Amino acid sequence: MNTTVIIVAYKSEKIIEKNLNELDLNCKIIIIDNSYNEKFKSYIEEKYKNVKVILNDNKGFGQAANLGANLANTEYIFFCSPDNFIEAHTVYKLEQTANKYKNFGLLILTDEKNKEVEIIQVDKEVGMSSFFTRRTNFIKLSGFDENFFLYYEDVDLVKRYLNNNLSIYKVPITFKNNHGSHDYIYNLEIEINRNWHYMWSKFYFNRKHNNYLLSFLINLPYLLRSVLKIILNYKNKEKKVKYKARFNGLINGYQSRPSWYRPRIK
């Protein structure tokens, strides 16, 4: 096989191992571990001889994914989300599809809930969790925009592929979605982190591909809604903190500040 599987992980040890048991172990696999777990690295590399674990300080999904792509030396790279339990021979099927669609830019996997039975071409920006691409195209486009820490980095990449006339297809390869690629139990800090970055990234994406004024106007209703929700939920701590995080993330976007917020998780 001429594909490297790249998995970006953050406190995903148990889920990662389940995923590795499903993947075709004849291909190369690189795991970028953003939680810098040395025990996890030793255990995985001892058990799975074709897997290389790179310990990385958490600078976001995009930075970790770019690191994995730069370390790969195969024609194709397959970014596989820890959430997605991929069926056997998926990489082989993707390589076969790549040989059929010579001009492809991205092959985006659809999950088991989708009804598509044929490969569908995409002509607008969409989100994606697991996808397949030529390494040269990914590197040529500078990979993910590392200004995104969380959210919208995938939509941004799709838009740039389309802007460069690289075709994108949804491929009906079934996978089970675990919905939650972390092993730790839900806590309020994770919810704060998600909401802060969702609004910051939403503003940054629109500013990047349009302009500041248009992004301001697009996101103004979200800002006002957050203020209203903070007021209405003044007695509900969890909801109040959630909408305060959205408000703060958006305000930081308006101020053109970088995506600085990081989760306080041990």
Image: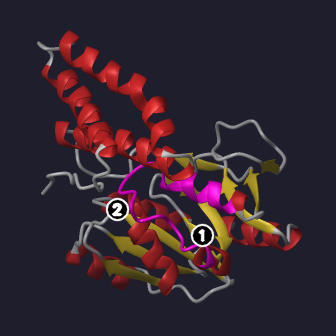
Per the image, the residue denoted by label 1 is 78
Q: Is residue 63 left or right of residue 134?
A: left
Disc 1 element: strand
Q: Which image quadrant for residue 196?
A: top left
Q: Nearer the viewer, residue 2 or 72?
A: 72
Residue 143 painted magenta: yes
Residue displayed at 24% across by 29% down: 242
Q: CA distance from mark 1 to mark 2?
A: 18 Å
The quarter of the picture where the C terminus appears is: bottom left
Specify the amino acid type for callout 2: Gly
Residue 60: mark: 2
Is 76 left, or right, of 32 in this rendering?
right
Range of the magenta residues? Answer: 140-161
Mark 1 vs mark 2: which is more N-terminal?
Answer: 2
In this view, 252 is above or below 93:
above
Q: Position of residue 210 (x, y in %)?
A: 56, 46
Image quarter for residue 44?
Answer: bottom left
- Residue 112, compared with residue 144, is above or below; it is above
